[in-house]
Image (tube, helix red, strand yellow):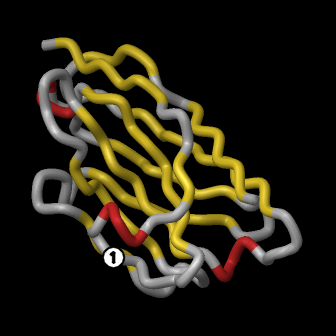
C-alpha cells in the first residue's frame, strides 16, 4: 500500500511562485523504485498531465503548458517529490495531484499511475 500526501498549495498572485510537496509512505518497497507524476484539474476541466520523474530522478518530462515554468524533482532520502512552480498564471489554477507508478515508467498517461494523493488547491489571482 502506498499513501501520498500533497502540501504547499495556496493563493498566489500571477507571476508568483509556489512549491508543492508530495510525501510518500510505502509499505516494504523503496521509494526510488516508483516513478512519480504531477497532474492537475482546473474548474470545469479534465485532469491533465503536468510533469513526471523517473525513480532515480535522471529523467524528467514536463507538459507543454508548464514547460520552462515548472520543475519536478525528488529527494529519495525523504520519500518526497516536489513541483516548483514559477511565473504562475491564472490558468494554472487547479487542484494538483501527486501520483505514483509502481512499474517506474514515468509517462504522461494517467492510466499508468497506481496510487494518487487527495490533491492540493492552487489558486492564481490576476
User: Quadrant where the C terminus lies?
Assistant: top left
Residue at 60% in and 47% down: 22
Is 8 placed left or right of 51 in the picture?
right
Is 57 placed left or right of 62 in the picture?
right
The image quarter containing residue 97 is top left
Q: Position of residue 14 (x, y in %)?
A: 19, 22
Of 73 and 94, nearer the camera is 94
The image quarter containing residue 87 is top left
Q: How many marks?
A: 1
Residue carrying label 1 = 107
Kind of element beneath mark 1: loop
Residue at 54% in and 30% down: 8
Residue at 45% in and 65% down: 113
Q: Position of residue 21 (x, y in %)?
A: 58, 44
Q: Is residue 61 above or below residue 40?
A: below
Is 118 placed left or right of 41 in the picture?
right
Q: Is residue 102 above or below residue 13?
A: below
User: Quadrant where the N terminus lies?
Assistant: bottom right
Is 14 placed left or right of 78 in the picture?
left
CA neighbours of label 1 inside 10 A, class few (<14), some (14 to 19), many (20+): many
Q: Position of residue 56 (x, y in %)?
A: 60, 84
Q: Position of residue 28 (x, y in %)?
A: 88, 72
Residue at 58% in and 57% down: 81
Amino acid at each position: 500500500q502506498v499513501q501520498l500526501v500533497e502540501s504547499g498549495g495556496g493563493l498566489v498572485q500571477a507571476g508568483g511562485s509556489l512549491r508543492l510537496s508530495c510525501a510518500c509512505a510505502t509499505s516494504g518497497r523503496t521509494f526510488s523504485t516508483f516513478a512519480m507524476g504531477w497532474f492537475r484539474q482546473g474548474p470545469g476541466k479534465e485532469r491533465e498531465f503536468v510533469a513526471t520523474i523517473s525513480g532515480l530522478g535522471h529523467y524528467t518530462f514536463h507538459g507543454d503548458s508548464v514547460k520552462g515554468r515548472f520543475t519536478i524533482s525528488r529527494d529519495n532520502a525523504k520519500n518526497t517529490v516536489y513541483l516548483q512552480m514559477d511565473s504562475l498564471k491564472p490558468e494554472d489554477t487547479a487542484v494538483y495531484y501527486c501520483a505514483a507508478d509502481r512499474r517506474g515508467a514515468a509517462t504522461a498517461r494517467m492510466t499508468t499511475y497506481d496510487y494518487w494523493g487527495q490533491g492540493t488547491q492552487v489558486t492564481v489571482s490576476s
